[in-house]
Image (tube, rainbow, N blue to C red):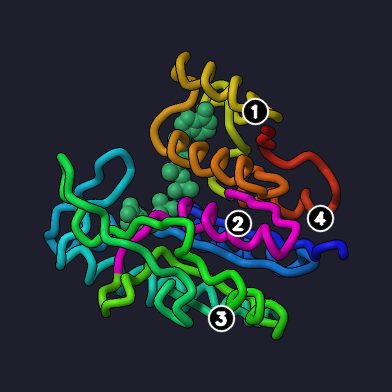
Amino acid sequence: MESKALHIIKIGGNVIDNSENLYHFLKDFTALDGYKILVHGGGKVATQLSETLGIEPKLVDGRRITDVETLRIVTMVYGGLINKNIVAQLQRFGTNAIGLTGADGNFIRTKKRPVKTIDYGFVGDIDKSSVDSQAIARLLEAGFTPAFCALTHDGDGQLLNTNADTIASALAVSLSTLFETTLIYCFEKKGVLMDVDDEDSIIRDIDPAGYEELKEKQIIHSGMLPKLENAFAAIASGVKAVVIGKSDDLGELKNGRPFGTRLSK
Ligand SMILES: Nc1ncnc2c1ncn2[C@@H]1O[C@H](COP(=O)(O)OP(=O)(O)O)[C@@H](O)[C@H]1O
Ligand SMILES: CC(=O)N[C@@H](CCC(=O)OP(=O)(O)O)C(=O)O
């Protein structure tokens, strides 16, 4: 039996922080056919609120050190403010979205990151058994569009902060056993660029060997490094396609025009 198509689309903090870009993206997201899941970050908004409240934000390699105070902030920002606004806007466009943390429906259960050299605090790591793909599939088949934020739980009453790129990749890997899954990372640039400051320098295809070369030449750095690690992990584990592109251009996918950077095995 041919499996049904599923798009898992992640948007990052810079898109969420700009109401015009977010509006445009959610409209294009609604126009995409078939089963869909949205995953959103919001790191930028969490950092801004931390600073406003006088709690110094601490990030190591793009991962937030999440102490008790910071967990309260990210719970309010990701699970409340951002998630509920996105759901309300999707409803306006006609997408029957349901806003979720990983604790809701026990959809994503993680383990608190063990302390090695750094104590990340309340950060949850995903493993192979974290995602309940069958339960999420039932939600999709009932007509809902899940919108996941970057919060998971440990099954013992503790919410945990989990990077949104990683959540999107883990959902894609797990659901690819049930659906023909495409994972799309949307952010504020046109894709992976040869020169971060030149939107016309887009690289259309990257394979693992090309990725190593780009890393070595430091053409890829900062937030793009963990994003591509997650993306290649997904491709290696059964996800049909992974694409990285600009949130404003998502409509090109529906029109069959080139969109962003495509990863290959
Ligand atoms: N070669 C590259 N092409 C595009 N972006 C890059 C590249 N290398 C590094 N980056 C950086 O990666 C960032 C995206 O990562 P991140 O901020 O984690 O995304 P998100 O908005 O999805 O959270 C971009 O804003 C850009 O500054
Ligand atoms: C553990 C960890 O780092 N979690 C992330 C979750 C949010 C996120 O991933 O947001 P963006 O996609 O907008 O960066 C954080 O708190 O920043």
**Label 4 to label 1: alpha-carbon separation:** 22 Å
Residue 110, placed above or below residue 262: below
Judged by depth in the image, the label closer to the viewer, 4 or 1, is 1
The secondary element bearing badge 3 is classed as strand
Specify whether residue 101 is in view.
yes
The picture places residue 251, in percent across and down from the top left corner, at 75, 54
Q: Quadrant of the C terminus?
A: top right
Q: Residue at x 34, y 71 (%)?
A: 153
Q: Give the range drawn in magenta.
A: 160-185
User: Which residue shows up at 46% across the image and 73% down it?
Assistant: 83
Inspect the image, locate mark 4, and give the three-letter code of the amino acid beneath it.
Answer: Lys
> Which residue does the numbered mark 3 point to in the structure image?
98
Instruction: Classify 10 Å Cα crowding around label 1: few (below 14), some (14-19), many (20 and above).
Output: some
Horizontally, residue 254 falls left or right of residue 149, namely right
- The tag earlier along the polypeptide, 2 or 4, is 2
Residue depth check, mark 3 versus mark 4: number of the one nearer the observer:
3
Where is residue 89 shown, x and y percent of the image?
Answer: 58, 76
Mark 1–mark 2 Cα distance, whole angstroms, equals 19 Å
**Residue 172 bears which disc, if any?**
2
Q: Mark 4 points at which residue?
A: 254
Q: What's the mark number on residue 119?
A: none
Amino acid type, mark 3: Ile
Q: For the N terminus, which image quadrant?
A: bottom right
Mark positioned earlier in the residue sequence (3 or 4): 3
Q: Residue 206 carries which label?
A: 1
Q: Report if the CB atoms under discs 2 and 4 are less than 8 Å apart.
A: no
x and y percent of residue 196 in the render?
51, 27
Viewer can see residue 43? no
